[in-house]
C-alpha cells in the first residue's frame, strides 16, 4: 500500500535480531540509543510531543477510569496509524503523548485522529462520569500543543513527564502517582 512505511521503529529497546525479525522490523537500526526508521529511500527518525487539553481545562484525568480509557484508546489509535507511542503522561487537566515514526502524517492529522477517536469513545462510554466536568458534545479544546523533538531516550522522557506533572497534581485533590506517567516499551 503506497504511503505506508514498510518497517516501523520500536521505542528505544528490543534490538535483538530475532525479535526484530519475528516482528517484521528487520530495517530498524539502533545507533547510540536512538532507533532509526529505515524505509526504501530514507533513514531517519521522527519524534513528536503532543499535548491535549480537555474542554474548559477541567480536571477530567483525576478520574482514573477516564485516564485509563484514554490511555488504551491512544494506544489503539497509534497501532492503527502505524506510529509508535514512546510514552504518555497525564496531568489533572491535560495529557502528553510522545509519538515516534510519524513521518507519513501531517501533525494536524495526527492530532485530529488521536483527539477525535478518544473524544468519541469517552463521550459514548463515559458520558455519565463526565457530567460533573463537561457538557455538550466536546471533550477536547479546539487546539493542541506540538513540538518536534530530537533524540529522546527513556530517561529523559520519563524525567520530563514526571517532573512537569508534579506541579499540576499539587493543585489537584489527588497526589501525583506513577500511574499517571506511562513509558511504553514496544509500541
Image: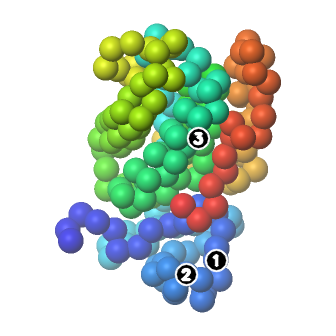
Percent coordinates x, y for residue 13 in the rendering: 66, 68
Secondary structure state at the residue bearing disc 2: helix
Q: Which residue is mark 3?
A: 68
Badge 2 vs badge 1, beta-carbon distance below 8 Å: yes
| Quadrant placement of the N terminus | bottom left
Gap between marks 2 and 3 measured at Cα = 29 Å
Gap between marks 2 and 1 measured at Cα = 7 Å
Gap between marks 3 and 1 measured at Cα = 29 Å
Percent coordinates x, y for residue 105 in the rendering: 31, 50
Of marks 3 and 1, which one's residue comes earlier in the chain? Answer: 1
Secondary structure state at the residue bearing disc 1: loop
Of marks 2 and 3, which one's residue comes earlier in the chain? Answer: 2
Percent coordinates x, y for residue 27 in the rendering: 46, 79
Q: Residues within 10 Å of mark 2 (few under 14, many from 20)?
A: some
| Quadrant placement of the C terminus | bottom right
Q: Which residue is mark 2?
A: 20
Q: Residue at x 65, y 83 (%)?
A: 16
Would residue 15 be found to the left or right of residue 10 on screen? right
Q: Residues within 10 Å of mark 3 (few under 14, many from 20)?
A: some
Q: Residue at x 64, y 33 (%)?
A: 64
Up-down: is 46 above or below 61? below
Q: Which residue is mark 1?
A: 15
Q: Residue at x 52, y 40 (%)?
A: 69
Badge 2 vs badge 3, beta-carbon distance below 8 Å: no
Would residue 118 be found to the left or right of residue 94 on screen? left
Using the rendered image of the protein, determine whether residue 34 is visible from the camera's viewpoint: no
Q: Nearer the viewer, residue 92 or 5?
A: 92
Amino acid at each position: 500500500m503506497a504511503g505506508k512505511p514498510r518497517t516501523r521503529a520500536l521505542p528505544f529497546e528490543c534490538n535483538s535480531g530475532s525479535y526484530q525479525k519475528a516482528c517484521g522490523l528487520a530495517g530498524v537500526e539502533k545507533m547510540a540509543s536512538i532507533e532509526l526508521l529505515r524505509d526504501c529511500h530514507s533513514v531517519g527518525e521522527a519524534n513528536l510531543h503532543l499535548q491535549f487539553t480537555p474542554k474548559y481545562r477541567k480536571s477530567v484525568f483525576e478520574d482514573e477510569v477516564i485516564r485509563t480509557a484514554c490511555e488504551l484508546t491512544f494506544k489503539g489509535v497509534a497501532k492503527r496509524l502505524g506510529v509508535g507511542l514512546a510514552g504518555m503522561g497525564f496531568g489533572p487537566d491535560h495529557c502528553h503523548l510522545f509519538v515516534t515514526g510519524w513521518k507519513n502524517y501531517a501533525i494536524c492529522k495526527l492530532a485530529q485522529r488521536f483527539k477525535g477517536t478518544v473524544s468519541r469513545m469517552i463521550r459514548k462510554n463515559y458520558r455519565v462520569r463526565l457530567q460533573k466536568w463537561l457538557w455538550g458534545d466536546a471533550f477536547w479544546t479546539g487546539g493542541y500543543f506540538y513540538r518536534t523533538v530530537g533524540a529522546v531516550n527513556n530517561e529523559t522522557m520519563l524525567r520530563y513527564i514526571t517532573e512537569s506533572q508534579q506541579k499540576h497534581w499539587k493543585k489537584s485533590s489527588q497526589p501525583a502517582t506513577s500511574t499517571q506517567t506511562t513509558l511504553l516499551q514496544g509500541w
